[in-house]
């Protein structure tokens, strides 16, 4: 193991659940980013430290990046996976409870990643097992490992994850990746500007939490006015699957589209992130721009998840 990692923090992560960005201190977040650096560019793979370890991926909702990058991460470190990518092929379709599914699966693996449409489902799963549980997204609530990837990508590009002006664009009502990152970015000491249609503003409960922490984000619907002063723009998809009323979705689905023309008003060094998938909120012509980091961000998923799995399983190369 590299001497660069503080053994006390290494200890703190062994067997730990990753359920919400609220559960991590600033020091712990920076520690994960440092640990991840050791796993970049194939780091840690040669020793195959996770051989014999099995990760269960229980995905009750669709995913490309989260599930596949977790699978790639453990396999690249010598481990293996079991799981399902569709609740319809699991016994949940026969009425099995989440609690019982987790109680059974814990006998087959060493750690569990779960994605579920219900807020709080990952915490419920964690209460049902002694194994480490990772929240791969629970409804509109949280997506903490995405946040570690986002911050890792921001640090690669900007050299730091504090003292930045970060804009969040799109669906701030239902977007769990935005919720998780907003909480962490505020705790790390960043300025926040929230750009969304009025109907899709950040939930009052999170605004209240930010206020209590002494953070006062600017809320606006005017992207072009906000752009000029930002270091980072975190774009999110309008989460069609969370809308109860299809007409409400129709009203906001085309609220924003980032293209080269819109970006003329941005600072020259603006970093553009998106947890992906995108639908129409970023024109593909933006992909070739220097600040467009979203594919890099998706690829960083393997690096960061290799680090998290190694820490949770207590086996570092
Ligand atoms: N960013 C993210 O969670 O992507 P998937 O939905 O494809 O996992």
Image (cartoon, rainbow, N blue to C red):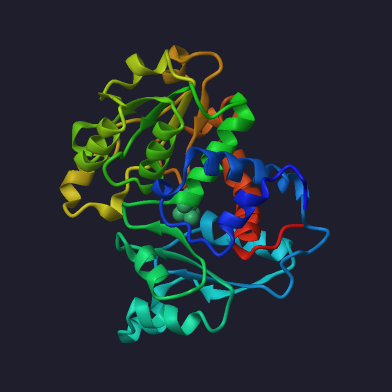
Q: Is residue 205 left or right of residue 39?
A: left
4 sits left or right of 28 in the view: right
Q: Position of residue 225 (x, y in %)?
A: 33, 14
Q: Residue at x 19, y 32 (%)?
A: 198
The one of 268 and 3 positioned closer to us in this rendering: 3
Residue at the spot 54% in from the left edge and 44% down from the top edge: 28
Residue at left 73%, top 45%? 38
Q: Position of residue 216 (x, y in %)?
A: 29, 25
From the viewer's perspective, is residue 259 above or below residue 40? above
Front-most of 175 and 192? 192
Residue 60 seen from this side: yes
Does residue 69 show up? no
Q: What is the quadrant of residue 88 in the picture?
A: bottom left
Judge whether 73 appears above or below 91 on screen: above
Query: Residue 159: horizontal and vertical position, in percent?
Result: 62, 25
Q: Tell me where residue 307 appears, x and y as whole percent.
A: 65, 53
């Amino acid at each position: 193991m590299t001497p660069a990692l503080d053994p006390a923090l290494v200890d703190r992560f062994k067997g730990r659940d990753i359920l919400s960005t609220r559960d991590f201190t600033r020091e712990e977040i920076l520690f994960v980013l440092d640990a991840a650096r050791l796993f970049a560019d194939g780091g840690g793979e040669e020793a195959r430290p996770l051989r014999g370890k099995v990760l269960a991926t229980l995905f009750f909702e669709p995913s490309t990046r989260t599930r596949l990058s977790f699978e790639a991460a453990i396999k690249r470190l010598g481990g293996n996976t079991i799981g399902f990518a569709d609740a319809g092929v699991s016994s949940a379709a026969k009425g099995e409870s989440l609690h019982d599914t987790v109680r059974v699966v814990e006998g087959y693996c060493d750690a569990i990643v779960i994605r579920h449409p219900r807020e709080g489902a990952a915490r419920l799963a964690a209460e049902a097992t002694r194994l480490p549980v990772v929240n791969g997204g629970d409804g509109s609530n949280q997506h903490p490992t995405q946040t570690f990837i986002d911050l890792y990508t921001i640090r690669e590009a900007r050299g730091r994850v504090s003292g930045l002006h970060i804009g969040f664009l799109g669906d701030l009502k239902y977007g769990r990746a935005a919720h998780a990152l907003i909480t962490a970015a505020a705790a790390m000491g960043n300025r926040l500007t929230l750009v969304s249609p009025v109907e899709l503003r950040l939930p009052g409960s999170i605004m209240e939490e930010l206020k209590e922490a002494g953070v006062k984000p600017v809320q606006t619907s005017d992207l072009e006015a906000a752009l000029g002063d930002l270091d980072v723009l975190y774009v999110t998809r309008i989460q069609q699957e969370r809308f109860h009323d299809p007409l409400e979705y129709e009203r906001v689905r085309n609220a924003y589209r980032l293209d080269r023309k819109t970006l003329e008003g941005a600072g020259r060094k603006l970093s553009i992130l998106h947890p992906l998938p995108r639908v129409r909120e970023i024109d593909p012509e933006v992909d070739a721009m220097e600040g467009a980091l979203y594919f890099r961000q998706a690829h960083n998923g393997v690096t960061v998840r290799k680090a998290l799995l190694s820490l949770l399983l207590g086996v570092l190369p």
